[in-house]
């Protein structure tokens, strides 16, 4: 056990954060502005999708929470709310700092705070208690809840009232210059946020219509987003990443429900004119049968080609398809193991996708996300450049 205080407290926290590899779990009822938080914590919580990110707070104290920071945590990981939370805990991998310091600029630079650093065996009980609060005591913060409390949170231009008027005592570490995920190339980092946005769009859309109620709603929405990208003057196309690597900000829409209904009506006319969208379900069934827990461990190269032929991203980039299916690039047993891990493993889905992407050459972000969507269409949407652009067209700030 190590006692942390004054400058040592923020320096030690940042040192652990910069070296994090497995998890970053934070409990704090007060949450400060994003600029200060990025100096306190660094950027790995926003740029490393292989790390489990959890923020436990009390959203009923939202006047003491920066909305921009809350939204950034929501995009990078998961947030849960625990009414009456007062503990301040910073868990990084197998270490835990238990302290009096809230996650605010004032706590780490203008207040006399103290904490203890527990590592290895010493930290296990604290980690287990956090996990218990997360799984048994707290509730998930949804996208709808995030939108609802936005107006009640602390303005980004000011810190929460905590510590106003106090002199600066300690220096915050410098802010790192890593590229962040918001409105940019988040790769797999914001997958959970993408799913939440997709579900919000699906809920609004399905309250208006279902064209093929026999297939999962996410597959029908994929058809809508594909339509907006390729048909009807291609309105969402410009929200994709351009050849010059520029990105338009998400579209600003005053009444998103009315806009979704308007596009849904035009989409239905297009489908009624004879355009087939049921092929998505056909591909989904092929992938489900070929990659069931038993089948995936016995799949051969012909079966893998059949799977690759089902993926939109592989068809749009045949070089990647042939690269993936080349035995000189990927060992058959390695493909089997990693596809089994991706679809049937127990880790968080985002972490499984990162592991699979790293293990298999020419099997990138779109491949892992499309495959997960085709295999479990009731739970996960298909994700590729078209769907990212479509969500941004409707005003959702997902990454490209």
Image (spheres, helix red, strand yellow):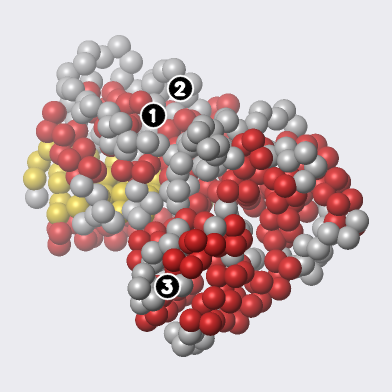
The foreground one among 143 and 381 is 381
Q: Are marks 2 and 1 in contact (CB under 8 Å)?
A: yes
How dense is the environment of label 3, judged by Cα within 10 Å: few (below 14), some, or many (20 and up)? some
Q: Secondary structure at mark 3?
A: loop
The residue at the far left in this view is 2
Q: Mark 2 sits on what residue?
A: 156
The location of residue 390, given as percent across then percent down, is: 66, 44
Mark 3 or mark 2: which is in front?
A: 3
Q: Mark 3 sits on what residue?
A: 326
How dense is the environment of label 1, judged by Cα within 10 Å: few (below 14), some, or many (20 and up)? many
Mark 1 or mark 3: which is in front?
A: 3
Spatial separation of the CA atoms under disc 2 and disc 1: 8 Å
Question: In the image, is residue 130 above or below residue 186?
Answer: below
Q: Please name the residue shown 43% across and 62% down the image.
A: 362
User: Left or right of 271: which side holds 11?
Assistant: left
User: Left or right of 44: which side holds 109?
Assistant: left
Q: Please name the residue shown 26% across and 14% down the image.
A: 166
Numbered mark located on residue 259 in the image: none
Q: Please name the residue shown 14% across and 54% down the image.
A: 119
Q: Mark 1 sits on what residue?
A: 34
The location of residue 288, given as percent across then percent down, is: 60, 77
């Amino acid at each position: 056990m190590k006692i942390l205080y004054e400058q040592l407290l923020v320096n030690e926290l940042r040192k652990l954060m910069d070296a994090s590899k497995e998890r970053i779990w934070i409990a704090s009822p007060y949450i400060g502005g994003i600029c200060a938080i990025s100096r306190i914590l660094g950027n790995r919580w926003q740029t490393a999708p292989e790390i489990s990110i959890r923020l436990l707070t009390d959203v009923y104290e939202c006047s003491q929470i920066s909305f921009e920071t809350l939204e950034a945590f929501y995009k990078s990981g998961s947030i849960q709310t625990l009414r009456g939370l007062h503990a301040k805990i910073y868990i990084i991998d197998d270490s835990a700092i238990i302290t009096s310091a809230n996650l605010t600029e004032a706590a780490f630079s203008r207040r006399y705070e103290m904490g203890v650093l527990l590592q290895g065996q010493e930290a296990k009980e604290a980690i287990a208690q956090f996990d218990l609060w997360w799984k048994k005591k707290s509730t998930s913060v949804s996208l709808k809840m995030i939108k609802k409390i936005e107006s009640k949170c602390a303005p980004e231009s000011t810190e929460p009232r905590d510590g106003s008027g106090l002199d600066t005592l300690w220096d915050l570490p410098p802010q790192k210059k890593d590229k962040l995920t918001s409105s940019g190339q988040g790769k797999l980092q914001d997958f959970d946020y993408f799913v939440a946005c997709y579900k919000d769009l699906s809920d609004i859309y399905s309250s208006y219509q279902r064209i093929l109620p026999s297939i999962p709603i996410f597959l029908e929405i994929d058809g809508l987003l594909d339509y907006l990208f390729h048909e009807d003057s291609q309105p969402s196309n410009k929200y994709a990443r351009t050849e010059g690597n520029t990105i338009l900000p998400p579209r600003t829409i005053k009444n998103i429900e009315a806009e979704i209904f308007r596009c849904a009506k035009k989409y239905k006319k297009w489908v009624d004119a004879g355009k087939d969208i049921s092929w998505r379900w056909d591909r989904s069934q092929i992938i489900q049968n070929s990659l069931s827990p038993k089948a995936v461990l016995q799949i051969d190269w012909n079966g893998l080609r059949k799977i690759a032929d089902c993926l939109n991203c592989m068809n749009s980039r045949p070089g990647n398809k042939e690269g993936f299916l080349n035995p000189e690039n990927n060992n058959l047993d390695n493909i089997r193991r990693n596809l089994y891990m991706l679809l049937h493993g127990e880790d968080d889905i985002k972490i499984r996708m990162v592991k699979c992407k790293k293990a298999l050459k020419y099997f990138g972000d779109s491949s892992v996300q499309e495959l997960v969507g085709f295999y479990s269409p009731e739970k996960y949407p298909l994700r590729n450049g078209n769907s990212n652009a479509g969500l941004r067209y409707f005003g959702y700030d997902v990454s490209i």
